[in-house]
Image (cartoon, grey):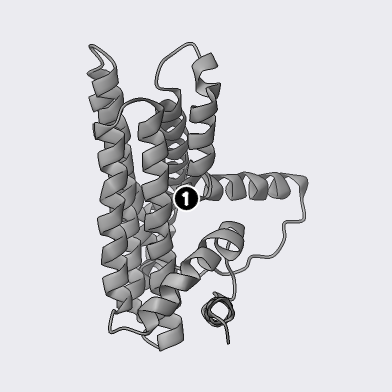
Amino acid sequence: MSFWSDVKQVYLDSRKPRDIFWNVYVARPMAAPLVMLFSKTSITPNQVTFLGALVFLGVIASLVCVSGSWGIVAAALFLELAYLFDCADGQLARITGKTSMVGAYLDFLIDEFKALGLVGAFSVRMWMQHEGGDAWLIVGILGTALVCIATSLTTFVRRKEYAGAEVKPGVHTERAAPGSLVGKVVRVLERGAQWLIHYPSWFVYLAVLEVVGVFDLLPFEGGASVAFLVAFLGVYALYAAKTGLGVVLKLGRASYYEK
């Protein structure tokens, strides 16, 4: 078979049974050549995960060290490249039979490190671009704290002792379609929030809008950075509030001990 036929077969053999649009049609097909090359070496899925994390440092460096539109563009390029490695590790694990729960938890750990890095880097970028912009350092501190709180809540509610069953990272259960109008609206909002959290799906759009000057129309500087922080941290805040309230309501009632 030709090289591209081999790549296509690797893609087909390494797909998840259920995945998001961006992964199915963009990221995983682009990662397939990497997967094929890695599969012919002794490189392990966990090593690919660490390589992706190393590439992601370029995102942070671009945001902090490169001013103007080129900083956002360079960050987008590094981010999408890092995400190819993020996809490739799981694909490599599936076609080589090296899947493991430790690897799944490592993916979750690295993803949260990336979220912290993005919030911190964008906040420092805004601080550096605005004279007397010390408030952005406070945004960075509060934002990284929010990500930590949300991550801790996720880890807690996934515990078998809390959920009643083991909830594995990366495993999604299909819920029944909502019947009421309110339920349908909530489902749409949840899908939108999931898209915003999955920043590789839309960060490239952010870079394009920055290059064409859309953010220049805003009455303040750093529009791309502000847009990212508002969208990203907004979803984290809603998630932390919703999940935290659920924990309080479940464990705070007196009847909890009457099981």
Q: Is residue 20 above or below residue 197?
A: below
Q: Is residue 252 above or below residue 236?
A: below
Q: Which residue is mark 1?
A: 200
| Residue 224 in the image, given as x and y percentages of width and height | 45, 28
Determine the residue positioned at 41% across, 88% down: 97
For the image, the number of numbered tags is 1
Determine the residue positioned at 47% across, 29% down: 227
Determine the residue positioned at 38% across, 52% down: 252
Q: Which is more toward the observer, 231 or 176? A: 231
For label 1, the SS is helix
Determine the image quadrant of residue 73: top left
Determine the image quadrant of residue 133: top left
Quarter of the image for the N terminus: give it. Answer: bottom right
| Residue 196 in the image, given as x and y percentages of width and height | 51, 44
Q: Three-letter amino acid code at disc 1?
A: Pro
Quarter of the image for the C terminus: give it. Answer: bottom left
Query: Is there any visible trace of residue 125 in the rendered image?
Result: yes
Determine the residue positioned at 49% across, 28% down: 210
